[in-house]
Image (cartoon, helix red, strand yellow):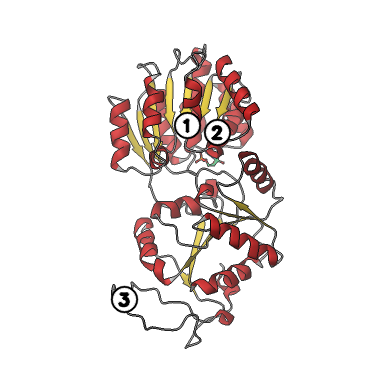
Amino acid sequence: MTFRDFNLDPQLVEGLDAMGFEKPTPIQEKAIPLILDKKNLIACAQTGTGKTAAFILPVLHNLLVNGSKGINTLVLAPTRELAMQIDQQIEGFSYFTNATSIAVYGGGDGQTWVQQKRALAQGADIIIATPGRLISFLGSDKVDFSSLKHLILDEADRMLDMGFFDDLMKIIKQLPEKRQNLLFSATMPPNIKKLASKIMPHYEEVAISISKPAEGINQQAYMTHDSQKEPLLLGILRDKTYKSVIVFASTKEKVKNLTRSLKKQGEEVRQFHSDLEQIEREKLMQQFKGKNVRILVGTDILSRGIDVEGIDLIVNYDVPPDPEDYVHRIGRTARAESTGTAITFINDKDIKRFMGIEKLIEKAVPKLDLPKELGRGPDYKDRPRSSHRGGRSKGGGGKSKSRNFRKGRR
Ligand code: AMP
């Protein structure tokens, strides 16, 4: 199948050719015909599967065929990074068209607020917004949604996790009732169906193998005590064939401390978390995308939606709390059929969690031996529930079948 089979407007096909998109991804194959057919849709697809093009191409096609006056499409997304990224993709696809889009998201200074307000009042064919920010503009009667034809909720599960349900309903109340609704979500918990039933009477459902990391990701893990994590990471980072690296840690504090230690060791590293000003986050993302920063250490704020090409390595310094987050984190690498490596450090407290991840992805992730000089890590087996205090000493020598960990890379 090729994009030509969808009979999309030639200007869009030209845009796709220019972007080097040759054939549709599975979610695009399934969703595009239904959206062109004006159906409401729940689509289960994670970031990295090509979901943005799946919902934007048919919307742009309709815009080109039917023309538009006023705001035609509203895309709601959980984070400013994702909103900006969707906007950038729209710019790419609509390069050979007259379609216009604006992104409206929080952060920034008073000037940004004024600019966004003005842009909203002037209107654009497609508005991409984070819910909280859009609400702050809705009091103004200058935002006119009366000609809206499509509502898209992207990463709907994430928006609900972030507590946006009421905001979403408030926004949706202001939209014309007759519209097409497209709800994209990486996971399908019951509250997504509840949301769907509130906003659309009938819908089609499409799913592609949810919760399965892309094939191109080489997943590995190390069993480590906490004290072994930092030297292990430093050893891995010494491999300069990893040119673009993201390290995920569980808390802001950990991110800050780890960044500090890596810097002390001479690594070129920056931190990414919610304490950073929006402007700093954008600048940092640009530097990382431009390959001017090699290593980003961040919290899960980095794990969703960030579309950076050519990330070679993801390190989970801690096992993510939720198995789905694992899929999101490692999905930062091997995007759109490229390859990449994802390495997870598992301490003895996180074994059960990691077992949950392996169950979800239906795959056992190979556990590599620690490099000899680090000693031995915990064993990968479920811990008994008793409060037994004995056990092996941390990182103790013992009998180790460890080998030089650089050989562990495949
Ligand atoms: P998304 O899941 O929408 O975040 O897309 C992930 C990445 O895949 C983005 O960089 C897209 O530009 C890229 N992509 C989406 N669809 C295709 C396609 N059909 N062919 C090649 N790359 C694609």
Cα gap from disc 3 to disc 2, whole angstroms? 46 Å
Mark 2 or 1 closer to N-term? 2
Cα gap from disc 2 to disc 1, whole angstroms? 7 Å
Specify the amino acid type for callout 1: Gly
Check disc 1 and report the residue beneath it: 132
Check disc 3 and report the residue beneath it: 387
Secondary structure beneath label 2: loop
Residue 48, given in percent of the width and then of the height, sits at: 50, 44
Is residue 314 visible in this depiction of the protein? no
Check disc 2 and report the residue beneath it: 106
Look at the numbered discs 2 and 1 and tell me whether their residues touch, using CB distance below 8 Å: yes
Mark 3 or 2 closer to N-term? 2
Residue 361, given in percent of the width and then of the height, sits at: 38, 56
Cα gap from disc 1 to disc 3, whole angstroms? 45 Å
Secondary structure beneath label 3: loop
Q: Residue at x 41, y 57 (%)?
A: 321
Specify the amino acid type for callout 2: Gly
Mark 1 or 3 closer to N-term? 1
